[in-house]
Image (tube, helix red, strand yellow):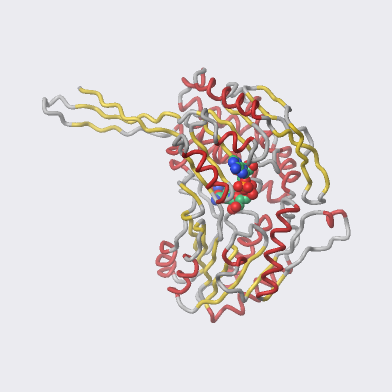
């Protein structure tokens, strides 16, 4: 972290709170401090957001809000390199990831919702009445009010703006709480909001932890009208209980144990290259990453060898976010090594420089584990993938769908009929065929089972962040 971490409440920056150490994951050394917001500051942020709902923001038209979102996108673009540097400093991810995915996607999030909200039309119906004069029904979409946006550490700016942009697009006000591990880009975003002259209190930012801290205080706050959360499934459960107390709506993007299916008719080279990307992008710390691969038996050996060879050659990857997360990932690997086979990786890379103090794990390919093994069943969220053979399409579907999670899956096949048969039969929110993480921001995004509640993306987000109201006018 280069500049100090600050809250942004009611249009003012504020650094009050108990210091919480920030650690650089690349070297494992101190990288600054985050002021953990006291409860009083969280209250103040919610109050500022409520006041702003009654201010000039309330009368902004969709076109005015759209122009503001574009101004925010322009502001991120103008400070692109600062955002990239902050993203890399916080997460340790390689520059090419931050500069080609995270920051461009944050800009695209604002532009996409700016365009969608400006072009949105309301529905209307003409109703017949006994007197023959009829009635006109039309729908207006009102903001929900004050929305809490709580986001994780893996794609900090991408995932924060993915919710903040549609929330603002629909006229809500926001109190955002990014992960306590990765506050940097959110601070820059608050500066951009201020520079864009977004009215004070419309966007507020508080830093701090989750349980017994800013996160929990926000979710339990009577002044919060809705909660948009991305993070672990268990945290989602805790937040849902807090929201249930006052029936606040929630939108949840949660954990996953994503699978890939490789059929014998697939282009094997493409399947191996695609799975290397889907398993090891950001060292497996993307919710969409593949952690299980099921391969049709005739090509199992060739695929597994190709994947292991590719994993051994990977370089330029980043570390785990924290020592605790590295230790968790290594525990899964150690247990898997005792119960099955390690085809690649399985340890900590040695650099013979300062990075040896960081939180690194080698890209790891496992095989030979039973389906109920923790490394096959539980989300690891690291650079670890298990490969297993299957014999029939039916068996393959059963293996994928037996997971308690249901976020995403990929099907590798050269048979177009199979693609259309298998993909919709998967119990997931997002299925890719012969690709991975190809995103169109208008499409529904989210998971089933323990992977989430609701859908985000395009109109799905605009619908979540608004309340449709019907007006019936007797003619
Ligand atoms: P996490 O659940 O520990 O934390 C996420 C956020 O919630 C953080 O800001 C944290 O401070 C806050 N939080 C934690 N406990 C809280 C509580 N009791 N009340 C309120 N807020 C609380 O998740 P993480 O470790 O930051 O992120 C990794 C997880 O996120 C993985 O499980 C991953 O799969 C998931 N994830 C899912 C998606 C998706 O789109 N489905 C995207 C990214 C990450
Ligand atoms: O691409 C997206 O919109 C999105 N929400 C990605 C989530 C990735 C999880 O780590």
In depth, the one of 220 and 2 nearer the eye is 220
Q: For residue 178, which quarter of the picture? A: top right
Would residue 440 appear left or right of 5 to someone viewing this image?
left
Location of residue 415 in the rendering, given as x and y in whole percent from the top left corner: 45, 71
In the image, is residue 370 above or below residue 467?
below
- Residue at position x 62%, y 54% in the image: 286
Quadrant in which the C terminus appears: top left
Q: Residue 348 location, x and y as percent?
A: 78, 63
Quarter of the image containing the N terminus? top right
Q: Can the viewer see residue 155? A: no
Return the x and y of residue 109 as percentages of the image width and height.
56, 40
Q: Position of residue 128 (x, y in %)?
A: 16, 31
Q: Quadrant of residue 186?
A: top right
Q: Tell me if residue 186 comes above or below residue 295 in the rendering.
A: above
| Residue 79 in the figure: left or right of residue 412 | right
Place residue 379 in its image quadrant.
bottom right
From the viewer's perspective, tell me whether residue 60 is left or right of residue 4.
left
Question: In this view of the protein, can residue 292 be seen by the observer?
Answer: yes
């Amino acid at each position: 972290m280069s500049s100090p971490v600050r809250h942004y409440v009611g249009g003012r920056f504020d650094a009050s709170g108990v210091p919480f150490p920030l650690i650089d994951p690349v070297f494992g050394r101190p990288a600054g401090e985050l002021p953990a917001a006291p409860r009083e500051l969280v209250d103040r942020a919610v109050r500022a957001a409520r006041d702003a709902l009654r201010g000039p923001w309330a009368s902004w038209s969709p076109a005015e809000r759209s122009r503001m979102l574009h101004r925010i996108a322009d502001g991120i673009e103008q400070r692109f390199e600062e955002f990239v540097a902050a993203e890399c400093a916080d997460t340790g991810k390689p520059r090419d990831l931050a500069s080609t995915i995270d920051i461009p996607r944050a800009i695209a999030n604002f532009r996409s919702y700016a365009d969608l909200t400006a072009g949105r039309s309301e529905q209307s119906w003409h109703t017949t009445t006994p007197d023959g004069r009829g009635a006109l029904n039309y729908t207006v979409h009102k903001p929900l009010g004050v929305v809490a946006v709580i986001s994780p550490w893996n794609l900090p700016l991408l995932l924060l703006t993915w919710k903040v942009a549609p929330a603002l697009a629909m006229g809500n006000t926001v109190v955002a709480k990014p992960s306590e591990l990765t506050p940097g880009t959110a601070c820059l975003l608050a500066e951009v909001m201020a520079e864009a002259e977004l009215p004070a209190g419309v966007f507020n930012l508080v830093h701090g932890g989750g349980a017994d801290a800013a996160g929990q205080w926000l979710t339990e706050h009577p002044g919060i009208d809705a909660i948009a959360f991305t993070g672990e499934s268990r945290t989602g459960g805790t937040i849902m209980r807090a929201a249930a107390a006052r029936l606040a709506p929630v939108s949840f993007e949660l954990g996953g144990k994503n699978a890939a299916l490789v059929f014998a008719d697939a282009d094997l080279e493409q399947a191996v290259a695609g799975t290397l990307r889907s398993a090891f992008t950001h060292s497996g710390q993307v919710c969409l990453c593949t952690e299980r691969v099921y391969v049709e038996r005739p090509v199992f050996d060739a695929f597994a060898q190709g994947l292991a060879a590719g994993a051994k050659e990977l370089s330029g990857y980043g570390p785990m976010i924290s020592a605790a997360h590295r230790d968790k990932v290594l525990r899964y690997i150690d247990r898997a090594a005792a119960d099955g086979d390690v085809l690649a990786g399985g340890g900590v890379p040695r650099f013979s420089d300062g990075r040896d103090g960081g939180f690194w794990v080698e890209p790891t390919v496992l095989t030979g584990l039973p389906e109920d093994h923790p490394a096959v069943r539980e989300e690891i969220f690291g650079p670890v993938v298990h490969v297993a053979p299957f014999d029939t399409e039916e068996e393959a579907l059963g293996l994928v769908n037996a997971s308690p999670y249901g976020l995403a899956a990929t099907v590798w096949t050269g048979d177009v009929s199979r693609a259309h048969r298998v993909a919709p039969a998967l119990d997931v929110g997002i299925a890719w065929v012969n690709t991975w993480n190809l995103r169109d921001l208008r499409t529904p995004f989210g998971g089933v089972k323990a992977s989430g509640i609701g859908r985000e993306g395009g109109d799905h987000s605009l619908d979540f962040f608004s309340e449709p109201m019907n007006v019936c006018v007797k003619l």
